[in-house]
Image (cartoon, rainbow, N blue to C red):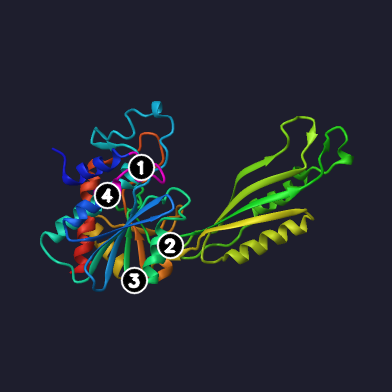
Amino acid sequence: MSSETIQLAEALISRASVTPDDQGCQQLIAERLQKLGFRCEHMRFGDVDNLWARLGDSSPLLCFAGHTDVVPTGPIEDWDSDPFTPDIRDGYLYGRGAADMKGSIAAFITACEAYLAHQQPTGSIAFLITSDEEGPAADGTVKVIETLEQRGEKIDWCLVGEPSSSNKLGDVIKNGRRGSLGCLLTVKGKQGHVAYPHLALNPIHTLAPALAELASTKWDDGNEYFPPTTFQVSNISGGTGASNVIPGECSVMFNFRFSTEQTPDTLEQAVHRILDEHDLDYKTQWSLSGMPFLTPAGDLVDACLQAISETTGYEGTLSTSGGTSDGRFIAPTGAQVVELGPLNKTIHQVNECVQASDLETLSRIYQAILARLMG
């Protein structure tokens, strides 16, 4: 017979909540939390459903943060079982969202249920759940945080259930994330016939040396908390589709994942300097997805490390690697933010799965964190 955590994870997975459609996941969560005495607010911004649920009014406030939305499945025929029909095979729970991150949400809830069955918190416990983490992230956590800030509601500790683990549950805790700065670069040339290049200006050719320099530049060495800043091109487009036409312009999309050694301004200035040195006719459109943040050793980090050690028998390590998360919207408020969840090996993949027993262990880890922080 499956456990409460597994059953709840299965109920969430069975809802095809592809961004930003929540498909009733948050209502299910709210009904579960209301039985524990949580006050539940459904906050809808645009097409996005969000849930803010709080138990208690006093400080400190520990918030469990996560998302009910999932990425598209890809070709369903490539899956060994229906992605929205949870299936346990050989000890693994399969389904879209099993690892990212409906399994964590289920473990959040059952951890709270187990904890509250025996004691009351010295502060408050909250849930911040969105259906817009995998999408534009414009009407999700960021809008909830804006609302909380406007009414002076402060999160002290935030535990995000993103799949942080690498090889075994709890081996990696994310206590920070790099910033993300993107750019759409458009380089102008002059369209013409490929047989008469002297009458045209090929923007792909003029861009190539500058792009090579950008790709080979060492931006910084990182620091004790962050790896070096990286630059990656994600898209290049240009041309009419005809083989005998020199294009009139070329567009490139690239992204920086940057450490605290950089700021958006320093990176933008460095890019413009390189482009100017190559005498390009260009324009840039920059987009900042999030600033880097770091939660150093302290109450939350220590509670997580101790909970992992006492529950699993091994030590977790701290890391700031990987992509962005909604923690980037919560950390600027002054909250301590940590990400701790299941293995990330299959996230966004066909046959996404999580070891069923890991969800039970994760629930116990979350319960131990509650006990350490809430008394």
Q: Nearer the viewer, residue 41 or 314?
A: 41
For the point 42% across and 38% down, the residue is 72
Whether residue 251 is situated above or below residue 271 in the rendered picture: above
Q: Amino acid at mark 3?
A: Lys
Residue 350 in percent (x, y) is at 39, 34
Is 217 inside the magenta-drawn segment?
no
The foreground one among 148 and 364 is: 148
Between label 3 and label 4, give the one nearer the viewer. 4
- Res. 329 mark: 2
Q: Give the residue drawn at x 34%, y 34%.
A: 83
Where 219 sits versus 105, above or below? Answer: below
Confirm or deny contact between disc 1 and disc 3 (CB under 8 A).
no
Residue 171 percent coordinates (x, y): 32, 53
Nearest to viewer (mark 1 / mark 4): 4
Q: Main secondary structure of the magenta part?
A: loop
Question: What type is the residue that disc 2 sits on?
Answer: Phe
Is 140 left or right of 35, judged from the image as shown?
Answer: right
Q: CA distance from mark 3 to mark 2?
A: 13 Å
Q: Which mark is residue 17?
A: 1
Report which residue position mark 3 lands on: 154
Classify 10 Å Cα crowding around label 3: few (below 14), some (14-19), many (20 and above). Answer: some
Circle 1 — which element? loop
- Rendered residue at 54%/66% (across/down): 261
Q: Residue furthest top?
A: 77
Q: Is residue 189 left or right of residue 254?
A: right
- Sort mark 2 into few (<14), some (14-19) or many (20+) by Cα contacts within 10 Å: many
From the viewer's perspective, tell me whether residue 355 is left or right of residue 176.
Answer: left
Sequence-earlier tag: 1 or 2: 1
Which range of residues does the magenta coloring cover?
Answer: 16-28
Q: Measuring from the top left, give residue 156's x and y in whole percent.
A: 32, 70
Please state the horizontal and vertical placement of residue 73, each as a whole percent of the image: 40, 35
Question: Is 20 covered by the magenta stretch?
Answer: yes
